[in-house]
Amino acid sequence: MIGLEADESVWKLAAGLAAAETPVEVAEALARNGGEAAGGSFANLAIVEPGTARVRVVHLALLDPDRARQWSTLELSDQVPSCEAIRTGLPVLVASEQDLKERYPRLVSLAEATGLVARAAIPLRSAGGSILGAVVFGWMGAQAYTETQLRRLDLIGQLSGLALERTSARHGDRWQSERLPNVLETMPNAFVSVDTDFVITYVNAQAQRVLGAPREQLMGACLWDALGESGDTGFETQFRQSLQQGRSVVFEQYYAARDTWFEVHAWPDHQGLNVSFVNINERQSSERRAAEALDDATSANARLSFLTDVSSALSGAPTRLAVFERLARAVIPAMADWCTIVEPEGDALLRVAAVHREPALDALAQRLIGTYPHSFSGPSPGVVVFRSQEPLRTDRLVGGIVADLDGSVASAAYGRTLQLLGDGPGLIVPIFLDGEVTAVLTMTRVNGEPYSDADVATLREAAIAVGVSLEGARHIQSERQTAAALQAAALPKALPVSARVQLAAGYRAASEGSQVGGDWYDAFELDDGRLTLVVGDAAGHGLEAAALMAQMRNVLRAHLFAGLGPSESLARLCGLLAVQEPDAFATIICVEIDPGSGETVWTSAGHPGPILARADGTSVHLRGQAAPPIGWSFLLSPSHPEHRLILEHGDRLLLFTDGLVERRGVDLDIGIANLMFVAERTHRGAEIQGACEAILRDMLPGSHEDDACLLVVDYKAASDERRPPPA
């Protein structure tokens, strides 16, 4: 099924119509995007000129100027699709060239000139239901006019009608031509003009027939006397309001003197009021059919909107459980007042999602999750649907379930919970994955209307989207597990142990999103006894980021073990990635510590510098000379500046990724200052692993948008090397 929600051309047209300020701009929007939105080659606008039997045709771009002028104005009685659609209020569909020749021979020459062999005219209605004109579409090939295509044309017609009504209310004078007596006399509708006292100043021939009196008798007479109605009528009320409020009115009114229903148009001008009477007796049946067709179109649009909402809600769901939770929320309240979802676990169906539209009862519904399993040997409607693989409708869902429960305490509690949630018509739908039922959705309308065949069809389509999302979640989960394995392999299994240097590290995955990030840390001892520490952050998430992280970790280790030092090792890594991974982007900080002397060398590729918490309770952020990140540094600088410091007894060094200190909308310096404060507070007497956990806990108290790594280093000098505290 082609979804209107996925057709960008329809939304382009809708945007153009919404932006239109005048009827001309409505016509221009249709000329630009109407043909494409209808799946055709052409669209133009035919508008009824108020108070006349004339139809103005706008935008005949496919015709030469002379022929365009010839077809720019039509009479409402002309046998062409646009006029017929306006007269009848029904769509006119011409499927082929042969169809055109048989029904509208006058248009054959136009078809030959333009190449448009099929065309459709859709009446344009105001919000009040009156017909304003028609939009005409053309195709170069024959058309079958499928149900989907007709819904599309109806939607375009509704959008165009509303836009035309809105703009005509502001600029209607641009469409009105000078009142020509010969046109008024020959128009098929009764037309009357009155002054501000409702004295008749003009009547056409048809108005004389409707009012049952000659022109000489009607001219100068009071309109109410001419109508022959005793007492106030709907005519008088509407006409007075139109004149007093200075606005047009359209209404339907029964005229007892002629036993006729009229659609009445009244619009004021500087002289008084103009009134047109359109006999609608013959069109009542067609209007009913049109109303039914509009109801069908409205239902179809609501169905499409629901399916769009479901697809949007399920998009990107990272896990199977997330798919079910989002689905349960998406069907409320459009299709149900409450719903549950069960999936097989062992020899029973277990509830994995439950939602109620009422917040107070939603908490009660949540208690059903994971409780009261439905045995495959039992009579539960969910089990019936799971086994039959077919939807099931019930008149009273809860009543039927409770009647089948056994007498156990657990069953009684379950039945009472369902009764509190509310009873009504139910619909149970299977959800498929790989051709098998993988879950069952149960919905209830509390004291609502029974589910229809259309509802069942809609939920079948929604179930297909759920299956697609489940497959996507399965793929995401598999990729996440692979990326997590790569990341785990890149992190050291154990931190090196040294008498003078103690290490602690921690990693926290992002709480928002589902993919593994590219943050990592590394720590190892070189052959000469120095300790090397690395913290990095590869851009992106998932397999790509994890693979890049593992590659950088291994290359950097090889260079550092070869004794190249932090600066040269980072430079060579930049050079390698510039050739093999030109799109790679990462930040890295690399530190080497001599445990014997406390001498420390560090360098950074775009990474935040370390925080040094001194034994005296103060701290400092070691910024150093800025260097570009991996991905830029090879192009900008062949090496990275090295920075040196001497660690003293009791000093603590913190290496971290920006996920620990960055927050959306908060300056980075504030985050680093907060980390310095936490480092000072946790330095007082806390052992290193506990301090590491406390820092992570304080810096990441709730949900956080990015992964975060922290590597903590404590230095202890030999007894004879310890300096006395400052006086």
Image (spheres, grey):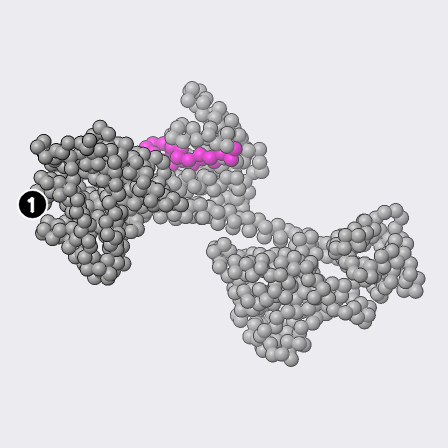
Is 357 part of what is drawn in magenta?
yes
Q: Residue 36, image x and y in percent?
A: 52, 65
Which portion, as a residue range, is magenta?
A: 339-358
Is residue 247 toward the left or the right of residue 589 in the image? right
Q: Secondary structure at mark 1?
A: loop
Furthest-left residue in view?
528
Q: Residue at x 48, y 28 (%)?
A: 418
Is residue 440 toward the left or the right of residue 649 in the image? right
- Quadrant of the rendered image containing residue 390: top left
**Residue 619 visible, this angle:** yes
Say which of 75 and 150 sits in front. Answer: 75
Residue picked out by circle 1: 527
Say which of 11 and 113 sits in front. Answer: 11
Q: Residue at x 59, y 73 (%)?
A: 61
**Residue 510 visible, this angle:** no
Is 670 part of what is drawn in magenta?
no
Q: How many numbered tags mark residues here?
A: 1
Q: Residue at x 20, y 57 (%)?
A: 574
Picture layout, residue 448 above or below residue 535: above
Q: Hey, what amino acid is under mark 1?
A: Asp
Q: Residue at x 80, y 54 (%)?
A: 243
Is residue 662 toward the left or the right of residue 116 in the image? left
Q: Residue 466, image x and y in percent?
A: 41, 45
Q: Residue 514, image x and y in percent?
A: 33, 44
Q: Magenta residues: mostly which secondary structure?
A: strand
Q: Residues within 10 Å of mark 1 (few under 14, many from 20)?
A: few
Say which of 341 and 54 sits in front. Answer: 54
